[in-house]
RNA sequence: GCCCUGGUGGUGGAACUGGUAGACACGCAGGACUUAAAAUCCUGUGGCCAGCAAUGGCCGUGCGGGUUCAAGUCCCGCCCGGGGCACCA
């Protein structure tokens, strides 16, 4: 049946069949013409902001996994619109980034051009599915009209500092005033705490000296630091872009390197980023990931005295979360890079220490992570425990990291597993401060044990001991309570071309912001994308750029994505990144949908930018997203064929025994899932595949069929398990495709794609169609009054759809539609009164067919402007109800009770007694349990 | 190792606060229409047992205990899968 499958009508008036393609094209066209999805910033309606994580427009196009989140957000946005909200639902492109530049290097195509092409393809694919995006608000991060404001916001960050007393970012000018009157005594330097000066000293500093100090305070600052350098990509990467010691993109090696870089002082916001998590609706897993990344720990910094070979004493500060175990310190460990190492090492140990440092330096980050060997060396020096003056040997070892805490630890082997292993390995005697809780074999890291062998702490449980020790240390002036964060400042520059240029000019080593009127500072055209000298970007090769002393780095991918949700609100404003009145109206994103992969990247950075803009008074809210939903990944369901090694013969899966056929080895090959029906291979299609590469293949079949093997893997072109939404939309229509994606399971859950079930959803839409049109007469709906039974079906569905949509349970909502249509079908209900409301209900899920049906019933305009049907209890209320009755916990029977009798205890007892007479051999009722709406339970 | 998730028919998955487990769909089986196939429609479909039958009984939500009249759901102890973090002192 050609028509059924192609969705083509022979004539326009042929309404008997559901010609989805024609219907979908018609309505997509009409929505476009009427600007049906344009959203106004001026409305009396309550607002609702539904946002998708905007895509990076890669060259590969969409597969069926990509639209999952977009469909969910589209349903929700349409639902809210029907419920009377003014809904902002925009879309755009995260268009700057490494892949476009890599592509440019390899193919010589300018990133702007390949990006443009990719965007056009994305847009075509998205339009196919019928989303309600307001495209008049589209943003592209690579558009100068957009990145003008990314640069502008950068300048605000550059022009401000974090005032810890006020706990917010304020203008850098306020700092000039403070320094001029009191020095920095009340505002210690976050970039370098050792910088201390008076007001007089400040006034006598040169401009360069003053600017260098200010740089240590700025939120966006330039400094030298150890960065993750990726040689293959020719750029530095942020911590979240490095995975297992290699780059997230491409998997190239990453090394530590000291370079001049731009940073964002996100560490100043650590506490607020943590606190804000309590005010937003993110999944527990997401909150967990973010707070792990921030890595807050509470402990103490303690000062030990070290005797140098010269005979003088030097302080050594350590950070510990367990000051309560201080009497169990058996050795100290410094990071190999620690500044005291060379100073305290004795002459006798110098060779060994230097050899060890050389060894550590020879090991890459990757090796260190891969094999966690116990290694270290004794320096020959001793430190004194400040509480009992015990001499403690000082070691260096690579397991202590220079970048965390003070780069030095006090090791308590009885209470810490790593310390214990280290002590064992080097035969360092272990002091037991845990009494019986320590068995001499392995450390006991428990935090609630009474201490022994611990001087004045003996007998105290650890939590109390913690307080007592900190108090004592502070009293003696040898330590204090200290909070530490694992999170580092975020590297904010890339030595690449395809990103936002920094609006910064260098002169005599001083960074000057460009004037606002010079924005946007446009990216110049280049001929070569090769990196410049000494770790600088391609911009360093352009003389017109370097002549103006402009910064040659560009901003990282997350710059543009850190504030795009604000630009959507006011996308064409050329006076401001977003008018304050407008951002006050739209406020937070009410619902944000996207994958978990941005947990510690984009989501953290955009929260940071929002807080900065809030502090500086540009917006009125400090958390960008009210509710975040993470859609699951759609995995690929790969199919395999098995070729007898060295031949052209393929063996059906069921004939294989222990990976062999007839004793011969087999090669398993990925085969395109698009020509496998379930597990059965379409042999003709396979023969034609890849220009006939397998044209001569021979097959050993079972039951006349070739069965493939199957495996769930990531969806990717190379595994031939990608399914293109375009194909499914062509074959079944966008509405079927949308509903099927939702029907597959909960949005948050990851699941493998399986095309098979799509027919069930398609059948449902056709069945729906037949409620309106019939094969003989065309339109078959009528105006007669709906019966009680019909209204009951309708209102039950209204309630279910409303509840399920609200709580994001789209799969059960789709099921509810199926039940409804099945029941109306059984009731032979073709009544306009019922069908019209059903069409409105269905709008969020299947917008094209509902528009068509709603109009077919004679309505004018668009169903988009209809109101969501109002559920009325009276239609679903039961006058009598059958109740299950259990006797002594066993289900025995059911009894029918009139609804008004439900409240009458007496009547129930009478009824119950009848039941008991029947089901038991007499005996009274001991207990009567009645849960309204549920079950009657009798104990006799 | 730590943290977060999840474990239900042949399959994807339902079951909101404890209340007749398996909605809905796929698949499968049977039937109707058809020369035939496709499509469509109807019926059945957790397992075991008894019965010609309507039906009835028993067992069933990863495993072992517990609370409760009643447990997929709550509590305790394990096993397995998925994701995140991982020398962070």
Image (cartoon, coloured by chain):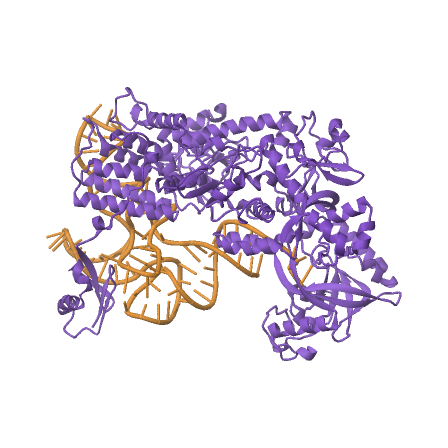
Chain colours: A purple, B orange
Please state which of residues A760 and A20 is positioned toward the viewer in this rendering: A20
Question: Could you say which quadrant of the image residue A152 lies in?
Answer: top right
Image x and y of residue B24, in percent? 29, 44
Residue B28 lies left or right of residue A412; in this view the side is left
Please state which of residues A919 and A579 is positioned toward the viewer in this rendering: A579
Image x and y of residue A11, in percent? 28, 19
Please state which of residues A434 and A659 is positioned toward the viewer in this rendering: A434
**Can you say whether A189 is above or below A908 in the image?**
above
Residue A431 lies left or right of residue A877; in this view the side is right
Which residue sits at x=45%, y=24%?
A: A688
- Most distant residue in the right direction: A310
Which residue sits at x=50%, y=47%?
A: A625
> Do we see residue A699 in this rendering?
no
Image x and y of residue B85, in percent? 59, 53
Residue A643 lies left or right of residue A354; in this view the side is left
Quadrant in which the C terminus of chain A appears = bottom left
Question: Could you say which quadrant of the image residue A427 lies in?
Answer: bottom right
Image x and y of residue A446, in percent? 59, 69
**Can you say whether A384 is above or below A38 in the image?**
below
Please state which of residues A844 and A147 is positioned toward the viewer in this rendering: A147
Quadrant in which the N terminus of chain A appears = top left
Question: Could you say which quadrant of the image residue A408 lies in?
Answer: bottom right
> Do we see residue A571 in this rendering?
yes
Number of labels in the image equals 0
- Most distant residue in the top direction: A11
């Amino acid at each position: 049946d050609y028509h059924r499958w192609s969705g083509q009508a022979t004539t326009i008036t042929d309404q008997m069949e559901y010609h989805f393609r024609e219907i979908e094209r018609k309505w997509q066209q009409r929505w476009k013409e009427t600007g049906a999805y344009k959203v106004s910033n001026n409305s009396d309606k309550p607002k609702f902001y539904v946002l998708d994580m905007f895509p990076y427009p890669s060259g590969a196009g969409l597969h069926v996994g990509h639209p999952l989140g977009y469909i969910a957000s589209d349903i929700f946005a349409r639902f809210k619109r029907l419920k009377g909200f003014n809904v902002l639902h925009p879309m755009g492109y995260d268009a700057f980034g490494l892949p476009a530049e890599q592509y440019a290097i390899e193919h010589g195509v300018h990133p702007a051009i390949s990006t443009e092409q990719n965007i056009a393809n994305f847009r075509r694919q998205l339009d196919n599915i019928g989303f309600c995006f307001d495209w008049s608000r589209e943003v592209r991060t690579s558009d100068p009209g957009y990145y003008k404001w990314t640069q502008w916001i950068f300048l605000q960050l550059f022009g401000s500092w974090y005032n810890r007393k006020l706990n917010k970012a304020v203008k850098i000018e306020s700092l000039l005033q403070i320094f001029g009157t009191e020095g920095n005594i009340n505002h210690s330097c976050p970039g370098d705490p050792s910088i201390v000066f008076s007001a007089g000293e400040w006034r006598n500093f040169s401009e360069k000296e003053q600017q260098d100090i200010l740089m240590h305070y700025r939120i966006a600052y330039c400094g030298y630091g150890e960065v993750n350098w990726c040689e293959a990509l020719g750029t530095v990467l942020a911590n979240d872009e490095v995975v297992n010691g290699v780059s997230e993109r491409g998997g190239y090696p990453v090394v530590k390197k000291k370079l001049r870089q731009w940073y964002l002082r996100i560490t100043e916001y650590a506490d607020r980023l943590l606190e804000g998590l309590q005010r937003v609706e993110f999944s527990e897993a997401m909150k967990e990931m973010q707070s792990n990344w921030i890595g807050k720990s509470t402990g103490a910094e303690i000062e030990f005295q070290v005797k140098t070979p010269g005979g003088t004493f030097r302080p050594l500060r350590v950070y510990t979360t367990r000051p309560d175990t201080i009497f169990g310190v058996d050795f100290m460990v410094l990071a190999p890079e620690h500044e005291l190492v060379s100073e305290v090492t004795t002459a006798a140990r110098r060779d060994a220490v230097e050899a060890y440092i050389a060894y550590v330096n020879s090991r890459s980050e990757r090796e260190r992570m891969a094999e966690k060997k116990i290694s270290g060396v004794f320096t020959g020096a001793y430190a004194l425990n400040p509480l009992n003056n015990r001499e403690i040997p000082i070691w260096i070892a690579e397991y202590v990291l220079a970048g965390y805490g003070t780069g030095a630890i006090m090791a308590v082997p009885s209470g810490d597993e790593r310390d214990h292993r280290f002590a064992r390995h080097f035969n360092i005697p272990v002091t037991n401060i845990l009494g019986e809780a320590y068995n001499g074999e392995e450390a006991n890291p428990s935090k609630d044990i009474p201490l022994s062998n611990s001087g004045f702490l003996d007998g105290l449980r650890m939590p109390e001991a913690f307080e007592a020790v900190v108090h004592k240390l502070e009293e003696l002036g040898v330590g204090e309570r200290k909070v530490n964060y694992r999170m580092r400042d975020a590297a904010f520059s890339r030595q690449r071309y395809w990103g936002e240029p920094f609006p910064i000019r260098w002169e005599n080593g001083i960074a000057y912001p460009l004037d606002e009127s010079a924005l946007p500072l446009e990216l110049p055209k280049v001929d070569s994308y090769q990196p410049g000298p000494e770790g600088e970007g391609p911009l360093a090769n352009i003389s017109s750029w370097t002549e103006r002393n402009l910064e040659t780095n560009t901003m990282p991918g997350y710059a543009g994505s850190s504030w795009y949700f604000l630009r959507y609100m006011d996308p064409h404003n050329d006076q401001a990144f977003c008018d304050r009145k407008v951002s006050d109206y739209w406020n937070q994103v009410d619902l944000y949908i996207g994958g978990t992969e941005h947990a510690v990247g984009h989501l953290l950075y955009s929260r940071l930018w929002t807080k900065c803009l809030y502090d500086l008074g540009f917006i009125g809210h400090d958390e960008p997203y009210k509710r975040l939903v993470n859609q699951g990944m759609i995995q690929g369901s790969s199919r395999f064929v098995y070729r007898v090694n060295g031949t052209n013969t393929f063996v059906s899966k069921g004939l294989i025994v222990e990976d062999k056929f007839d004793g011969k080895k087999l090669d398993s090959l990925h085969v395109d899932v698009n020509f496998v029906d379930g597990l059965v291979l379409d042999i003709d299609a396979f023969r034609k595949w890849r220009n006939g590469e397998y044209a001569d293949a021979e097959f050993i079949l079972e039951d006349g069929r070739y069965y493939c093997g199957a495996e769930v893997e990531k969806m990717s072109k190379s595994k031939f398990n990608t399914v293109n939404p375009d194909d499914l939309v062509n074959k079944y229509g966008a509405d079927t495709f949308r509903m099927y994606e939702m029907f597959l399971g909960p949005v948050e859950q990851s699941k493998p794609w399986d095309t098979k079930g799509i027919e069930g959803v398609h059948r449902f839409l056709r069945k729906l169609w037949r409620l309106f049109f019939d094969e003989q007469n065309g339109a078959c709906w009528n105006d007669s009054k709906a019966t009680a039974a019909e209204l009951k079906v309708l209102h039950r569905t209204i309630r279910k759809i409303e509840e399920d949509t609200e709580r994001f349970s789209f799969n059960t909502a789709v099921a509810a539609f199926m039940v409804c249509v099945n029941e109306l079908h059984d009731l032979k209900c073709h009544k306009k009164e019922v069908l019209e409301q059903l069409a409105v209900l269905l709008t969020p899920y299947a917008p094209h067919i509902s528009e068509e049906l709603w109009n077919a019933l004679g309505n004018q305009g668009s169903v988009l402007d209809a109101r969501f049907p109002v559920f009325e209890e009276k239609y679903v209320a039961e006058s009598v109800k059958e109740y299950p009755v259990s006797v002594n916990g066993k289900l025995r029977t059911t009894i029918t009770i009139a609804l008004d009798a439900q409240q009458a205890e007496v009547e129930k007892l009478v009824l119950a007694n009848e039941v008991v007479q029947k089901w038991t051999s007499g005996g009274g009722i001991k207990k009567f349990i009645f849960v309204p709406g549920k079950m009657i339970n009798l104990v006799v």
